[in-house]
Image (spheres, helix red, strand yellow):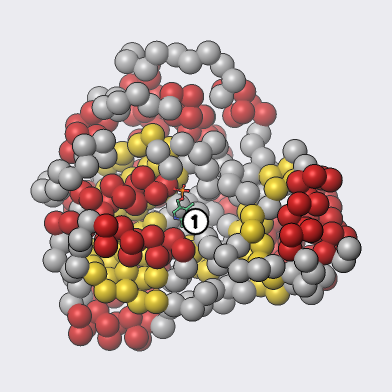
Amino acid sequence: MKSYAFPGNIEEDILAIGAQQIPYMRTKEFSETNKESERILNDLIGNKDGRVIIYTGSGTGAMDAVVANYVTTRRKTLVIDGGSFGHRWSQLCDYYSCSHIDIKLDFGKGIDYEHLEKVIRVERPDTLLCQHHETSSGQLYDIEKIGELCRKYEVSLVVDVISSFLVEDIDMEKLGIDIAITSSQKGLNIPPGLSILFFSNRLLDYPFAHKSYYFDFQDNLNNLTRGQTPFSPATLIFLQLNARLKEYEKNGVEPNKQRVKEAAEYFRSLCDKYEWSILAETPSYAITGFQINGDPEKVIRGLIEKYDTFIMPGSRKGFFRVSHMGVASKKDLENLAQQIHELEMQ
Ligand SMILES: *Cc1c(COP(=O)(O)O)cnc(C)c1O
């Protein structure tokens, strides 16, 4: 099987961790593992003296937790709605009855930062929710510019870095991010099931709300101080996470960023060759979102049935997304592009 979805293909040694018997989690060994994971996670995202929560749940769980515990305590929130993930922030604000205004962007388009500044100046939000990489289109936002504006107008910045963590440069302290979230099946390229929240040290004494029993920040933070989760964790994924993080601690994250970048650049050259257009104005290296010319249904079914291969359909007809975060050789990418082209021409 070849997967260019989330996660992509995973190395055998990490997969093997998921095939073992499951160790009991209320032990000092499991606590040590989690405390080590928290330390490395903070190092990787520049979250000096900050805290981490790891939930058993998908990425949306962390988004939900942020709105329930934090955004509900804020006066007014600005949402960047540039695709289905940005829109999810907006829906969560509605769900929890948080006062919010949205900046809606056309699919694949970047932010007009002058307009953003004007909206902040006029509307005076105290919180901003955005993505770093809007994975539905492949568009990457300029988080440095967003960070500067938030600092200037004293807006608390919350960023969904779910599909940019470990692929694009992110330093929470330098960028002034108060909360960042990610999840296991994207940049970390391990099975889905964990979502991770990073709190900057500025929020350590913040009076969070208690509106979600399972996701309660204070309860989870208290438990993670001793390396434990309040409820049963997806133990083996926690162990896969730890193995992945130790690899980055040893080798640094640059080789991974380089690998993903090279895969993206190579696949984009193949898109040029087959005349598939890339829609995002400033594409992230994490995925390539591209519009094919032929019949999308034939492509998606043909890839599965004939080649045992997965890519991701997008929200528009003929728009596909190929993730570069999994293991793939140049030859793999060449074969993939050839197969898509053969199927679209049928
Ligand atoms: C994948 C993703 C999510 C969360 O999706 P889940 O299916 O809940 O894991 C949220 N935001 C972004 C930007 C994503 O790429």
- Residue 117 position, x and y percent, is 29, 82
> Looking at the image, is 188 positioned above or below residue 275?
above
Indicate left or right for 64 with 238 as reference.
Answer: left
Residue 301 percent coordinates (x, y): 76, 52
> What amino acid type should be assigned to the residue bearing mark 1?
Ser
Q: Is residue 287 above or below residue 61?
A: below
Name which residue lies at 39% across and 76% down: 104
* Other residues around mark 1 within 10 Å, as few (<14) / some (14–19) / many (≥20): many
Q: Residue at x 40, y 38 (%)?
A: 57
Q: Which residue lies at the image location 74% right of the left edge and 59% below the top edge?
A: 297
The one of 27 and 200 positioned closer to us in this rendering:
27
Can you identify the residue that label 1 sits on?
Answer: 164
Q: Quadrant of residue 79?
A: bottom left
Place of residue 235 in the rendered image (x, y in percent of width and height, measured from the top left): 43, 24
Q: Residue at x 27, y 57 (%)?
A: 95
307 to the left or right of 61: right
In the image, is the residue at mark 1 within 8 Å of ligand 1 by its beta carbon? Answer: yes
